[in-house]
Image: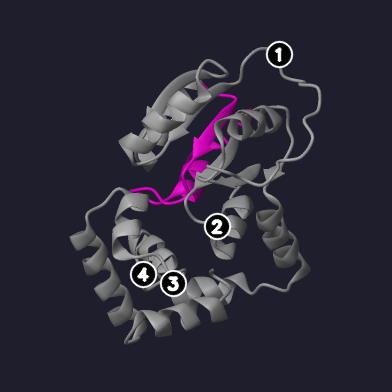
Amino acid sequence: MNEGSTGPTAAPRHPGPARVVIVDDHAMFRRGVRAELGGAVELLAEAADVDEAVAAVLAHRPDVVLLDVHLPGGGGVEVMRRAATRVPETRFLALSVSDAAEDVIGTIRGGARGYVTKTITGPELVAAIRRVADGDAVFSPRLAGFVLDAFAGSIEVAAVDEDLDRLTEREREVMRLIARGYSYKEVARELFISIKTVETHMSNVLRKLQLSSRHELTRWASDRRLL
């Protein structure tokens, strides 16, 4: 795994290891994150959907929540909506397979302090958690550019969201990976689902968007700056 630099690390303002909750609907991925973090943080709990995540945040009041963007029950933004005002000291760091502009911007608007993709290395993730716990915002350079562009008005997020409303969260994930040139086998491995499930999602995506091929899908996604 390899993520762009999160920038120079300042002296920590938060004493001791950061107290962390991991939220992701893939158990295999959560195990991988635990292994990468080792003893660098204090892991309080894990959650696999929105309800579990909200309960964990309210129960443990962590310093940082590692939050997947697409979750059963409403997504990462719904977790923040339900928990952030009740536990204002907790900060949210998005850790997602998606690096699409509308996901990054929507998650930051929802209250996250940073956004990194699942290509990040273990040491980089530890540094990102520490910086978010200390109150900093953390992005890789490309994702930071999305946020700057959005608030400068050069990305029309509302229009993108309207087009994507036809797709489920999982269909969006499959759509982006296929549009980037991933094979069905690679998508299945990336998302921890079967090839047959990928095929089903792809069929649904093409039908809902009224497209006839993955080449048209790539053009559709590129026009909307989703790649």
Q: Earlier in the sequence, mark 2 or mark 4?
A: 2
* Helix, strand or loop for disc 2: loop
Q: Earlier in the sequence, mark 3 or mark 1?
A: 1
Residue 46 lies, with reference to residue 112, above or below; the image says above
- Dot 2 alpha-carbon crowd within 10 angstroms: few under 14, some 14 to 19, many 20 or more: some
Q: Nearer the viewer, residue 111 or 205?
A: 205
Q: Earlier in the sequence, mark 4 or mark 1?
A: 1
Query: Badges 3 and 1: C-beta atoms under 8 Å apart?
Result: no
Residue type highlighted by circle 2: Asp
Q: Earlier in the sequence, mark 3 or mark 2?
A: 2
Q: Which one is closest to the eye, mark 3 or mark 2?
A: 3
> Does residue 79 belong to the magenta stretch?
yes
Q: CA distance from mark 3 to mark 2?
A: 13 Å
**Residue tagged by mark 4?**
167
Give the label on residue 99, or none: 2
Q: CA distance from mark 2 to mark 1?
A: 31 Å
Q: Earlier in the sequence, mark 2 or mark 1?
A: 1
**Residue tagged by mark 3?**
179
